[in-house]
Image (cartoon, rainbow, N blue to C red):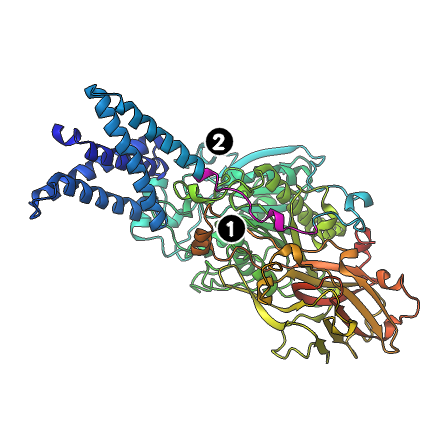
Amino acid sequence: MKKLFSDPIFLATTLLIAMLFGIAGFHFELGFPPMIGMVLGIIIGIVLLVSLKLLISLVKPLFKRISIGFITTFLSGLMALVFLKNFAFRWPTLLFYLLAVWVFVCCLLLTFGLKKIIQKKNNKGWVLVIVSLITVVLGLYGFNSLDGDPYLEAKTNLDTNTNISLLSEKGVVDPSQKGSYEVEVFTYGSGTDEKRTEYAEEVKIKTPTVDAFRILPDWKGKKKKWREKFWGFGVENFPLNGRVYMPKGDGPFPLVLMVHGNHSMIDYSDAGYAYLGELLASRGSIAVSVDENFINAHWSGDFRGKEMPARGWLLLKHLEQWKKWNDGSNADLAKKVDMNNIVLVGHSRGGEAVSIAAAFNELERFPDDAEEAFNFGFGIKGIISIAPTDYRYEREITLNNINYLSLQGAYDSDEVSFWGMRPYHRLKFTDDFNGFKAGVYMNHANHGQFNSTWGRSDFGAPMKWLLNLKPLVSGEDQRQMAKVCVSAFVEAVLKENKEYRNVFKSVDGITDWLPKETYLSQYADTSKKILMDFEDDIDVTTGKDSIQITAENFKIWREEGLKSRDNGKQQNNALVLGWKYGSNAEKDSIPQYHVHIPNALKDFGALDTLALSVGVGDISELDLKEDEGDFKNAGFNFSIVLKDSLGNEASADLASTTILPVPIRSKFTKFKFLDSEMIGKDWEVQLKSCYVPISAFLNKTDSLDLSKLRTISLVFDKDSLGVVVIDDIGVYGQNEMEEKSSQLE
């Protein structure tokens, strides 16, 4: 054994294995302190390496010219690396083994150098040691230098449009500002939690457990054994644990339940929404951060989405408990809650869970096991999904007549696409529903920073070392965006402050409340008369209500289902138009898209605003020459022309009343080829709701008769090169747009 460890090659291999296994052990959460995990990892790695070395040495090689020591060292080291790659590191294969070779070379130089220094042969040993250290430093520097946003120079139209009025200038108060209520913070729970004192002896109110046996039948096997050993309870007695942020006062107050998503079950997530809880409570709502850590993933296993019904069901069981307290079972909470005014907020898998909860709330039986009866029917008025999944539960949830908001970061490495817009598109309103739905997309925001404890990296080490973290906004800035949007939604939905709907109609009007970043927002309600949504059929020449379509001079003209960056479905159809013409083009060669509306606006009333959703398309479809193939040379502005039945017309360009959308591209990892392999494309089409007030047209002419409006034309006369995606072309009447007048002039 002594001879074995005096071999520089074996010693270098041992250092390599010990280092990598130690790193894996440090970050592989076993419930022990990280340093103990690191020591265990090092011991396992060395024992594995030595065992493999000895095992291979027993097989006498037939090759006499090759050292048996070299062969056994090489094979044992390689087998240990394969073991590490498959069970701990999980890097892409090429990168992992390149890393291993680099570390091995550094270790080899170091061990040879130290051996020479110890033997005091000459000064070459110090040279080797210094070279090994320089190699390490240069490698780490080069690796970190790969961080950054290569697409910043491609941004256009980021300057604020002077024609956009800020909501604050109209007297609307920033919803992220602390309110006037004092806030009381306490926990409720089983009172017997073996892992967390806040849900044991520190609880203010003890709660009963609930039986989720039928809701989560996958609680079995090793997952059951290890989880119950760790937590001290099983699926038949799940606790109802929550952190409460309550305004001091008589009430009744609206109720907001917040729930985390999937994370390490021993890295508790429920404390990470205190910033929202304290804000909402100070503004007059009871906020509760619900603990569902016990069904999160860990070394004991991930339920792989089979736990999604339980995530939603548990929220309803919390509401059931709040109803009992409110009805008088707890004197301190009696009559404190307005159970008809409830919003559910979920992050990650929790963002999908809130939709599941809203759907279960209307059912009499559990759809996966009808033996489980439901009796909920709570007054859930709205749901907020933050960086949600929309594919974990095998049943696709479609909701009706509920207010909805989804938030997403463009640098989310966990949920790389804006999945929250799929429930948005599936959500349907009846004509008598006075609510709305919205989505807000923020550049340089990731997945984890919406929770104050999850951090900047959406992956744990060592995978997180591959992520491109430098472009990310700070956690404070990302949570500021969440505070503005979540609080504004609660004000609009639970307190009926309709002025806060304007936050979501256009983020252009709240730039003084938000960190300086690029945002896209989408908005819809029943007050908008939709003329074209491109969902009805596959005929590109027709639309709703006998609308006819004509177009000319486009390089691209089609209607298609939009795709996510990994080619998944966004569940939304849109119009794609592309054009390219020279600077000396004749007027009759300008691309134009015409919506002919013979009867669509009959009896609609006076028009106030033209509205449409706009996104940037893939300009590479135009097969541009080298000097044209950059977004700097493209434009996304166009004119909108209204024409009545007498031939009178007026026009306005889109950029005069809105900040045009820009292509938001992301580099998730340090290597672009890894993005292609792990993530998909560097961008996906996301739309922005844009508005052009009718006054912008009428100010240019007094001859246009809007009561006889017959054609809406999109004329691409502003920029000679571009591809745009357009959806939901429609109009607002004057009565419907009263609240919008505070934002758009």
Please tell me which residue lies in front, 563 or 95.
95
In this rendering, is residue 4 above or below 587? above
Q: Nearer the viewer, mark 2 or mark 1?
A: 1
Please tell me which residue lies in front, 629 or 189.
629
The disc placed on residue 485 is: none
Is 496 left, or right, of 84 in this rendering? Answer: right
Q: Residues within 10 Å of mark 1 (few under 14, many from 20)?
A: many
Tell me the residue that label 2 is attached to: 202
Which is more N-terminal, label 1 or label 2? 2
Q: Residue 439 in the image: state x and y as whole percent.
A: 63, 55
Amino acid type, mark 2: Glu
Residues at marks 2 and 1 touching, judged by CB atoms closer than 8 Å: no
Which corner quadrant of the image does residue 137 belong to? top left
Examine the rendering and report whether any part of residue 500 can be seen: yes
Is 256 left, or right, of 719 in this rendering? Answer: left
In this figure, what is the number of numbered marks? Answer: 2
- In percent of the image, x 49 and y 40: which residue is there? 454
Examine the rendering and report whether any part of residue 618 can be seen: no
Tell me the residue that label 1 is attached to: 350
- In percent of the image, x 64 and y 33: which residue is there? 183
Residue interval drawn in magenta: 143-157
Q: Residue 394 in the image: state x and y as whole percent.
A: 45, 63
In this rendering, is residue 127 above or below 545? above
Please tell me which residue lies in front, 89 or 632.
632
Q: Residue 529 in the image: state x and y as whole percent.
A: 74, 68
Residue 154 forms part of the magenta stretch? yes
Quarter holding the N terminus is top left
Q: Residue 625 in the image: state x and y as whole percent.
A: 59, 63
Quarter holding the C terminus is bottom right
**SS for dot 1:** helix
